[in-house]
Image: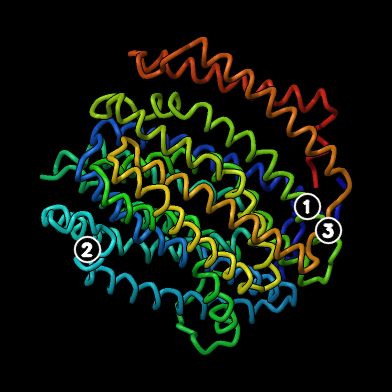
Amino acid sequence: MPAAGAPAGQAAGPPGGGGRRGGGLLRSTAVFSAMTLLSRIAGFLRDALQSRVFGVSVAMDAFVIAYRIPNYLRRIFAEGSVQMAFVPVFNELRERGDQRALKEFLDAMAGALLATVLVFAAVGMLAAPLLARLFAPGAIDDPAKLELIADMLRITFPYLVFISLMALVASVLNSFGRFALPAATPVLHNLVMIAAIVWVSRYFEEPVMALAWGVLVAGVLQLAVLWPALGRLGLRPRFRPGFRHPDVRRVAKLMVPTLFSSSVAQLNLLVGTVFASLLVTGSQTWLYLSDRLVEFPLGLFGVAIGTVILPHLSRRHAAEDGEGYGAALDWALRMALLAGVPAAIGLLLLAEPLTAVVYQGGRFTPHDTRMAAISLAAMSIGVPAFMLTKVLAPAFYARQDTKTPMRAAIITVVANVLMTIAFTTPLWLWQVPGAHGGIALATGLAGIVNAWLLWRYLKRAGLMRPQPGWGVFWLRLAVACMTMAAAVVALRIWIGDWTAIESLLLRAALLLAVVAAGALAYAAAMLALGLRPRDLRH
């Protein structure tokens, strides 16, 4: 694949230093992915402990609801809307080389963001009982569950303040090519949650309440770890609410349309949470745990590629480098497909083994494993689309076009609601076990709709500039995925029922062996078909 313009990691820093030369998009993505891998490993340990200690219960369903609501707002004020609107404006100011103007903008932006999220957090805490009824309509006749949800919301909403500021700091660091530390901070979140499960939960009358407090403490620590890094860049902000600052107003104008588009996947999950409250107890927990497994490849590859590509595309656009912009986008799309398609096949074929290894044990029964595996298999079909969206949406945001992704997001959410009703209602009425799988299927298909719409809009706008070799790329991908699937299916048939294997170590060893065999088959097929590591470089 041809290089495009100057090296991707090279970025103009503030006067007097602060910039640094990097090794290109592949190296930056690899750094982000490596740090994310540490976080995901810690996340698996957290989920394993959480499922075994708390199992599937009314209290766990309550926590899932109380966590999802501020988590959705986090996607807006943290790595969602604000980030997508902030990064292009920030990089445009960097290109001008005026350090004072850059610092004034950051001061004004930080102050405005803090003031806004403080208001949202306060309103969320005051309106907690109303939010509990709104997002858990199936619990209207269960006052104890509604009260538990409201109590947890009062604890988790302040998390929004700290995680939003942390995301602003991370966006600045990413713009200067510092990807490692922001990518590593989620490890802290998982470690705090593990401590809450293992040690803190025993001190609460309702042990699950410790998870809500863990979320809040984790947000505080993540911000505390990243904050000093801004000082080393000479950009530690003073909180001066600058709602009238022209560039803050530009960010706000760009941000409004992204309220839907940057968090469409989370919004679809929130819709699913509402519908799941009408189903049997445990449905929210099964969906939540399935989503956690889907988030592994998405965070490891999709978010990594999207995070790295946004500042790069915004710099290319600011420099009016159309060729570099098109080549970088082409590279990102290929990387997303190379990771996303085999990940989806792996999750689909290994849904039950993965669930059994990560979650089964203690209070999480083989029945729970099978139920969570249903939603994981259904949701997995959307993984390639979720990854592509992480690339396609930044292609618009880098050009400060936030309205087009919003149109796609609105259509996607409507499609998700309609599909959820169509898939879930008959299963619910007929009392079919695993009705929550209809919600997961709708989420996966909605992801495909969103990615297709974004691709179509990009093509219509003339922003897609395919580089040579797509025909060979598709052939390699298809053959390699079929080779991988054959290896995985053969080993699954030979091993049999994972839920019946009592030893966790044996289950884990067998799963690692199958995953390794599938990965080797995929890599070997790619190499046999002529793909070389140098072909992955931008």
State the mark number for residue 133.
Answer: 2
- Badge 3 crowding class, 10 Å Cα cut-off, few under 14, some 14 to 19, many 20 or more, is some
- Three-letter amino acid code at disc 1? Asp
Q: Residue at x 44, y 65 (%)?
A: 164
Disc 3 and disc 2: Cα gap in Å? 48 Å
Report x, y in % for residue 23: 76, 47
Q: Are marks 3 and 1 in contact (CB under 8 Å)?
A: yes
In this rendered view, identify the residue nearer to me: 249 or 128.
128
Report x, y in % for residue 25: 73, 49
- Can residue 17 be spotted in the picture? no
The type of colouring in the image is rainbow
Dot 1 lies on which element? helix
Tell me where residue 157 sits by quadrant: bottom left
- Three-letter amino acid code at disc 2? Arg
- Which numbered disc, 3 or 1, marks the residue that appears first in the sequence? 1
Disc 3 and disc 1: Cα gap in Å? 7 Å
Report x, y in % for residue 353: 44, 23
Identify the residue position indicated by label 1 in the image: 330
Identify the residue position indicated by label 3 in the image: 465
Dot 2 lies on which element? helix
Disc 2 and disc 1: Cα gap in Å? 45 Å
Q: Residue at x 31, y 49 (%)?
A: 276
**Relative side of 18 to 358, left or right:** right
- Badge 1 crowding class, 10 Å Cα cut-off, few under 14, some 14 to 19, many 20 or more, is many
Vertical order, 477 against 315 (above or below): above
In this rendered view, identify the residue nearer to me: 262 or 184.
262
